[in-house]
Amino acid sequence: MHPAINQNPDRNAIGDSFWDQFSHVPGTIESHVPTFDKSLDAYFDQHFAAIIEEWDLVTEGDLEKLQNRLLRVSDEISSLYAGKAAIEARAERLDDLITSLEKSL
């Protein structure tokens, strides 16, 4: 067969089929046409801090601080309950001692 004659009717002179070329078109169009997503992303990039502040949104840093605070408060509560139990035990012993003193008098 002559080299100038295209052996595959689906292939063009460049060597790509029409469908191969067509599959690249959406990526090409998307890269040149501004979309709502791109403009929305740009808006959020520019106004991110103000949006978080205005809407009282929580950042990961805020969550970490809150988790650390929760751990400290939980430890403090546990400590207070342990102290309460110790004071109640002392009060019970003192009550027993007072009762035994009153009986011995």
Image (cartoon, rainbow, N blue to C red):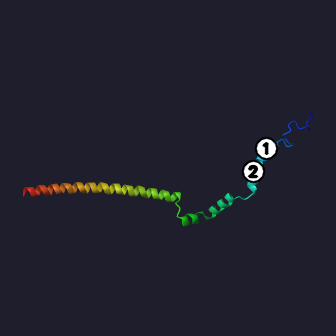
- Residue highlighted by disc 2: 26
- The residue drawn where x is 34% and y is 54% is 78
Residue 67's mark?
A: none
The structure residue drawn at horizontal position 82% and vertical position 42%, both measured from the top left corner, is 17
Q: CA distance from mark 2 to mark 1?
A: 12 Å
Point 9% across, 56% down: residue: 103
Specify the farthest residue to the left: 105
Disc ID at residue 20? 1
Instruction: Identify the image quadrant of residue 36.
Output: bottom right
CB atoms at circles 2 and 1 under 8 Å apart?
no
Would you place residue 87 above or below residue 3 in this image?
below
Quadrant of the image containing the C terminus:
bottom left
Disc on the earlier residue, 2 or 1: 1
Name which quarter of the figure residue 93 lies in: bottom left
Left of 3 or right of it: where is 66? Answer: left
Q: Position of residue 47 (x, y in %)?
A: 61, 65
Residue type, label 1: Asp
Tell me: residue 13, above or below residue 48. above
Secondary structure, mark 1, is helix
Q: Residue 6 appears at what percent x and percent y? A: 89, 38
- Secondary structure of the residue carrying tag 2 is helix
Crowding near pointer 2: few (<14 within 10 Å), some, many (20+)?
A: few
